[in-house]
Image: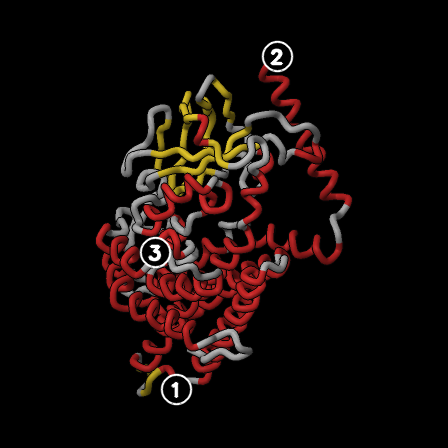
């Protein structure tokens, strides 16, 4: 691992990084190698160890028991955790305070955040729906006020950890959009407390079969008259779309960190294997084809890491960097798929077995190109920042809205 220049890496940050790496190699990697698979679950004792390390409260202020650090330290730690098991690097994101920290009054922060730090109040976010994907302004799940409660009806998709979480943050439409160019209005966010390991009355969940991202389950949720107390509304009614987008820069930096961690794990394993595996009388690390692969892999990882450091520094300074956040998410995730694939190639047939962790890195790296906005979405954001919105994009958005409105009219006719 490089010592990193440009003043990013203070002595304190090196200590944080190295402690996270030591924890990962000692506590996370052995568990991942043993349990990763469709039926594997992140053990409760490992979750407690994460809490003991303070990793559920990295960005929660010290007054609530957190570490009071920034995105830079958060991504340093998550890169190391992902080197062991990406799902563990992701479960710490189910803490950190989220929308509680950014949109709730002080009384609720004081009530909830200390529990978050202790790992007792972890979140699952229900944003996407079967027909929306990345177009979150088009969600159709409905919430209707009924006295002192909200009644929620509809479906949610891709809700990871929905069963194991202590609460859900769910986005639903509380009023229709006023116009096609303001589809984001009318969406509200709700905090739904629940028993860990079950769903609240009025909600059912069906696990979605996946090829990776094991250690927890991902669900399709069906809401049929789910009742939420009025005080469960987070932020202003009808303006929750801004809550969705507010944290996207940090979420994309976090995904980049996870992608870099996966790639680093694959690189280190490939180097070790290349030094041990002999063909035609000598270690394959002696062959130029293998040496050049490793050189390219290491270079791409370091380029992604340095861009991530820059983006995290921008986020922590409060400067806008949505373009750069999309760049690092796009570059790091694409890089991770290439690097983990090359690592599998170095392993040869052994890499296509479950006897080595490299296949896990490869499977999980593929997901980083999809979640938190696909690579194509990131390219759209970057190009729009550089070139402006095209007439074609504007036309597609307008027609999609008209189609949605026509379908709704037909349903109520």
Identify the residue at horizontal 51%, vertical 74% (top origin): 8
Of badges 2 and 3, the one in the foreground is 3
The residue tagged 3 is 88
Residue 179 x/y as whole percent: 70, 29
The residue tagged 2 is 413
Kindly state the secondary structure of the residue where label 2 is placed. loop
Q: Spatial distance from mark 2 to mark 1, Cα to Cα?
A: 73 Å
Disc with the residue nearer the chain's start (3 vs 1): 3
Label drawn at residue 286:
1
Identify the residue at horizontal 39%, vertical 86% (top origin): 286
User: Can see residue 363?
Assistant: no
User: Can see residue 61?
Assistant: yes
Disc with the residue nearer the chain's start (2 vs 1): 1
Label drawn at residue 73:
none
Disc with the residue nearer the chain's start (2 vs 3): 3
Residue 75, by quadrant, is: bottom left
Q: Spatial distance from mark 3 to mark 1, Cα to Cα?
A: 35 Å
Identify the residue at horizontal 30%, vertical 51% (top origin): 118
Of badges 3 and 1, the one in the foreground is 3
């Amino acid at each position: 691992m490089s010592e990193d220049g440009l003043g990013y890496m203070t002595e304190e940050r090196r200590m944080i990084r190295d402690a996270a790496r030591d924890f990962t190699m000692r506590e996370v990697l052995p568990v991942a190698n043993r349990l990763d698979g469709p039926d594997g679950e992140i053990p409760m004792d490992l979750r407690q160890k994460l809490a003991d390390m303070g990793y559920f409260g990295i960005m929660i202020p010290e007054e609530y028991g957190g570490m009071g650090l920034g995105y830079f330290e958060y991504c340093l730690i998550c890169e190391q955790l992902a080197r062991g098991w990406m799902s563990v690097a992701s479960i710490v994101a189910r803490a950190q305070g989220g929308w509680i920290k950014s949109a709730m009054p002080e009384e609720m922060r004081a009530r909830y955040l200390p529990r978050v730090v202790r790992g007792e109040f972890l979140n699952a976010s229900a944003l996407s729906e079967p027909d929306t994907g990345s177009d979150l302004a088009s969600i159709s799940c409905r919430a209707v006020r009924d006295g002192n409660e909200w009644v929620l009806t509809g479906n949610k998709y891709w809700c990871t950890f929905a069963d194991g979480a202590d609460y859900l943050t769910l986005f639903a439409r509380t009023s229709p959009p006023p116009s096609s160019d303001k589809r984001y209005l009318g969406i509200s966010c709700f905090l739904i407390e629940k028993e860990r390991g079950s769903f609240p009355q009025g909600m059912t969940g069906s696990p979605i079969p996946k090829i990776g991202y094991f250690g927890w389950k991902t669900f399709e949720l069906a809401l049929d008259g789910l009742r939420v107390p009025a005080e469960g509304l987070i932020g202003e009614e009808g303006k929750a779309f801004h809550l969705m987008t507010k944290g996207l820069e940090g979420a994309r930096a976090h995904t980049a960190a996870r992608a870099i961690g996966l790639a680093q794990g694959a690189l280190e394993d490939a180097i070790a294997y290349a030094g041990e595996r002999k063909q035609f009388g000598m270690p394959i690390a002696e062959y130029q084809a293998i040496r050049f692969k490793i050189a390219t892999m290491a270079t791409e990882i370091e380029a992604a890491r340095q861009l991530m450091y820059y983006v995290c520094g921008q986020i922590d300074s409060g400067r806008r960097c949505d373009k750069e956040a999309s760049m690092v998410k796009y570059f790091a995730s694409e890089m991770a798929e290439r690097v983990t694939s090359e690592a599998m190639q170095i392993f040869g047939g052994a890499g296509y077995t479950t006897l080595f962790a490299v296949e896990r890195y490869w499977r999980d790296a593929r997901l980083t190109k999809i979640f938190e906005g696909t690579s194509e979405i990131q390219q759209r954001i970057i190009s729009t920042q550089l070139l402006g919105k095209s007439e074609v994009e504007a036309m597609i958005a307008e027609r999609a809205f008209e189609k949605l409105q026509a379908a709704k009219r037909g349903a109520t006719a």
